[in-house]
Amino acid sequence: MDVAGKSFAITNTTPMPPWKTWILRLIFLVIGKLGVPKKDQQNLVNLSFIHFARWVIIPRGGFPRLSNAQPVESLNYDYMLFCSNFNGSWKQYIDAFSEVIPGGMNNIWRWSVGYPGSQPLTPFLAYIEQNQYDNDYYYNATPGASTTDILRALDLQRKLTAFVPASRGLSAVEFEPAFDRFLASVQNDLATTGMDTVAIAFDFSTETDVADADHDARPAGRATAA
Amino acid sequence: MPNRFGQAYALTILSPVAGGHTHGAVHALDIRAALNRVPHGADSPLARLPMLHFARFTVIDDVRLQGIPAKEDHLRSKYLVFVADFDGDLDPFLDSLASNACDLVSSVWQYCEAFPGLTDRAQFRSYMHRCQVTSTFPFGAYAGTPLRDVLRAVDTQRRFIRFLERSQGARGDALQRDFQGLVGELANAPLPAPGTV
């Protein structure tokens, strides 16, 4: 169960030699303090397809042990758990990461055993798929809205909240041009949200065909959410 | 504080699945069967948690083999991974989870090692704390915005678009009157329930 409305859940673990996890922790610390490098940050913003994501480093001795009856883990590697909630299909997501922020991906995953690099794409896709888990249950509080839909809706809400008091007291003659200016300022915020049939009909084996067929079947002129 | 990003909290729980089996089926399968019975979308028990953006349950049977020359690793327990992105602090969320999704929590975690049940909330919180793994690097595109405001904004967006469709071509007095109608509609609009937008 990896799909909930427009959102897709990826869950993935990759092994890392314990001494390398300290390098990755340092990288995350630097990114956390200084922010994502500007170019990658801008690319991520432009992509705008991740709702929430996380990287979790689990030390080889860090798996919870809650009773004496539970066997002690004896692992060779630390593990990095990666969870993401994103829009689009799995292949689109991995493909975009590989194309748009290959350096960023390499900085995070190059410490993992067997990581082939984010480019070329085919071994990168195989590596992610090999280390991925199917989710057993997935919940999304806003299934009809993509990340972009939500960011645009929040922008509209902010601007509308400011426009309402500013337009109060205007005469009808003054209101009309003020409203036109307001409308022009929010024209990118007017995506139509709702359940997207591409996500509902998603299927690994026929991913492209389903998406294309659905796209072709859409009524002309329908405003589609990003 | 690595679990936090903005006002949002990135909770990662790894609960070891109890050893043994029920009628020949290992408990990991019992967990999957229990999760398979849980409704989705607005009918999900998780939709009763007003601060929860996303959540998932994943049973990890073992780590993935990487092949030669990597060393071979195997887990000695299976783990139930519960991942949630929510607004605010951990303990209020755990209390809300125990109160609003008690059937889900009991039906799934009953198969996990040392799960104390939900009768004693302090014990439940303590159990979840013991199962928590620190999220090293959380990210959220709108982690500064509570779910309540997200739901409100998406609803406003839909109502505003419907207003534009209704008022196409309206000018002057008519336009202003229609807009004031929208403002009144928005002021009285109920907050959409989680899972419905």
Image: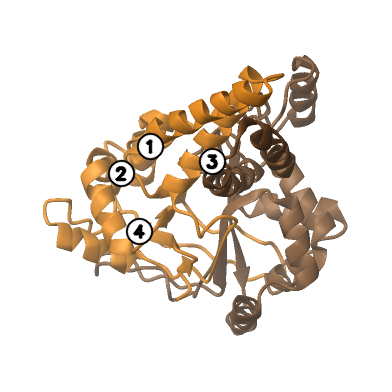
Chain colours: A brown, B orange
- Using the numbered discs, state the Cα–Cα distance from disc 1 to disc 3 in whole angstroms: 55 Å
Q: Which of marks 1 and 3 is in front?
A: 3
Both on one chain, marks 3 and 4? no
Q: Residue at position x 71%, y 29% from top? A: A224
Is A218 in front, or is A82? A218
- The residue to which callout 1 is attached is B35
| Disc assigned to residue B108 | 2
Are the residues tagged 2 and 1 within 8 Å (C-beta)?
yes
Mark 3 element type: loop
Label 4 CA crowd tier, 10 Å (few <14, some 14–19, many 20+): many
The answer to which of marks 1 and 4 sits earlier in the sequence is 4
Q: What residue type is labelled 4?
A: Pro
- The residue to which callout 4 is attached is B16
Q: What residue type is labelled 1?
A: Leu
Q: What residue type is labelled 2?
A: Val
- Using the numbered discs, state the Cα–Cα distance from disc 2 to disc 3 in whole angstroms: 57 Å
- Using the numbered discs, state the Cα–Cα distance from disc 2 to disc 1 in whole angstroms: 7 Å
Q: Residue at position x 37%, y 60% from top? A: B88
Q: Residue furthest left?
A: B119
Label 1 CA crowd tier, 10 Å (few <14, some 14–19, many 20+): some
Both on one chain, marks 2 and 4? yes
| Disc assigned to residue A169 | 3
